[in-house]
Image (cartoon, grey):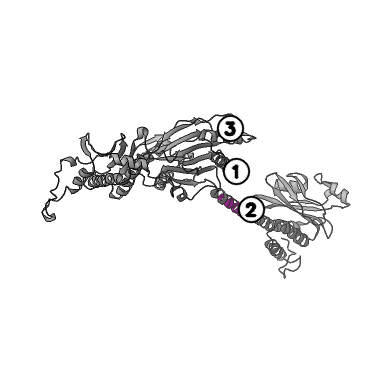
Amino acid sequence: MKEKYLPLCGRYKHCQSYPLDAIIEMSKAVGREIRLENLLKGIIEKTAELMDCDRCTVFVYDETTNELWSYVAIGIDSNEIRFPLGAGIAGDSALTRKKVNIPDAYSDSRFNREFDEKNGYRTRSILCCPMINVEGRLIGVLEAINKNTGGAFGEEDEVMIECLSGCSAIGIERTFLTDKYIEYKKNQEIMSFAREIQMNMLPADFSTIACGSNAEVYAFISPATDVGGDFYDYFFVGDNRLCFAIGDVSGKGVPAALFMAVAKTLFSTIARGGATPGQILHRMNQELSRSNEMMMFVTMFAGILDTATGLLTYSNGGHNSPYIVFGDGKIEKLEAAAGTAVGLMDKTVYEEAAVTLNGSSAIFLYTDGVDEAKDESGRMFTVARLEAVLRGIAFNSLRGMADKVLSEVAGFTAGAPQSDDITILTVKLNGRAIPSEGGLYDRSFDCKIDNIPIILDFIGEAAGSLGFGGSFAFDVKVAVDEACTNIIDYNCAVGCKIDISVETNGQDFIVAIKNCGEPFNPTTVKPPDISLPLEERQIGGLGIFFMKQLMDKIDYESKDGLNTLTMVKRRPINTQSEVNLQ
């Protein structure tokens, strides 16, 4: 700073404190605005005043195009000005990141006279200064033209414009950040709304299926981003046909979410029209493959469960094979009827397969966000780990099954970010007696006293389905109640189950009860002497006595650690007549 600057009041340009006061004035100007257009106007007005020049322009750097642009300038009545970095005097200042002080613009080859000639203006002196932020990133260029006192801009002006450029860079960058934040919040609000719409498209009230029906459903979905491409659906078509599907659209984000919405709508529309699983996938494929320039597709499994018979008919369009989980350490992978993803080739034919579920099994469906979930080192959860979890599940509820799998996945990933959408869909018959091949009704129960009512419901439903009702079924249930209670109280080993099968040869109602506990033959128990007064009778044996009275035949066998109690009750002739009359 030259000696002529004296520590005076700061109100005049010859005062030493004038540059500081100018910075304060500029800071106030840029601090009042958050809209970029208004801010730029404030910057050029304050710069023209403080620099005592005829015109001033603020050029903002566009990183995406590597250009400088400005639609605000004192003395200019025109649309946006835009030119590449390095072009002209302002462009050279931005490129070199140095101040440029031109005493005579017309003598500098970088100056373009086109504007002057068009508007009748005469540019004499130019002073440009790059605007750089604290990280050293280019924000733009501040340009002053034609000093009002005549002649060139001096050293004091160079100091001043450098100070003003620093303030302006801070203000402009703040508006950029503010705009980005506002845009982010808007997008966040839009995506949140989109997520809500997408989630509302998926059925979530699982009680509507279980209540009054012969089936139970539970599902879970967690998109990796605000919206995703996974989906599931289920609904009844008629009284006994439960249609369900799970799908995974290629890609993520908004495109996948839009494609998902179309796919789910098509599934619902086609399935409700009475189509079979193979027909559903075929017709969906035809629709989705039309005008599919982005080559998007959906892997999908579609099934229809007849809840009256337990027959599951299904078709697979390139999706992960589901599992039948039996709850006793056994699982079965449904690998039949595997086809290609839906939406790629319009002439694809999708095969169908069928399997029969019973009341002790459930179907587990999932998307690859489960088996391909990654830990922090990039290792995947894998199908093998999933199968190990499913084998170890002794599920009491579908939600418990899903929660167990999700818990294992979460433990494996251990805080790593979710890499893909995760979706699980589980379906089972709601504890009803469903015959397997040959008309055999069978089900496995945990060895718990709380399961006695469930066991008796199973016996009653099987008896009714086989044509044995009324007092006949009541007698059988009393005998089974006594037998199973004795097994649970005295014979069940840790982890042991009670396996019950029911069948008929037309005349006999046959119940076989198996368990792996301590051997005990109830047929050898001596019947109590019921002629004696109660206080004189020997304790025990009364329940087994009633079993023998209610059933026509009871056999016991213990072989290879398995106890089998077989009870037979014959159908009276008059009972058959009563059933036929009913």
Q: Amino acid at mark 2?
A: Glu
The residues bearing labels 1 and 3 have C-alpha atoms spaced at a distance of: 17 Å
In this view, the mark in front (2 or 3): 3
Residue 283 position, x and y percent, is 57, 34
Residue tagged 2: 183
Secondary structure, magenta segment, majority class: helix
Q: Which residues are magenta?
A: 184-195
Residue tagged 1: 258
Q: Is residue 97 visible?
A: no
Q: Earlier in the sequence, mark 2 or mark 3?
A: 2
Q: Amino acid at mark 1?
A: Leu
- Please state if 117 lies on the left or on the right of 166 as rendered: right
- Please state if 396 lies on the left or on the right of 4 as rendered: left
Quadrant holding the C terminus: top left
The residues bearing labels 2 and 3 have C-alpha atoms spaced at a distance of: 36 Å
Quadrant holding the N terminus: bottom right
**Residue contact between numbered discs 2 and 1, judged by CB atoms under 8 Å:** no
Q: Earlier in the sequence, mark 2 or mark 1?
A: 2
Q: Give the number of callouts.
A: 3
The image shows residue 170, relative to residue 362, as above or below, that is below
The residue nearer to you, when weighing 400 against 251, is 400
The residue nearer to you, when weighing 279 against 88, is 279
Tag 2 secondary structure: helix
Tag 3 secondary structure: loop
Q: To which quarter of the image does residue 189 belong?
A: bottom right
Residue 287 position, x and y percent, is 61, 36
Residue 44 position, x and y percent, is 76, 58
Q: Neighbour class for label 1 at 10 Å: few (<14), some, many (≥20)?
A: some
- Residue drawn at (64%, 53%) of the image: 183
The numbered disc on residue 344 is 3
Tag 1 secondary structure: helix
The residues bearing labels 2 and 1 have C-alpha atoms spaced at a distance of: 22 Å
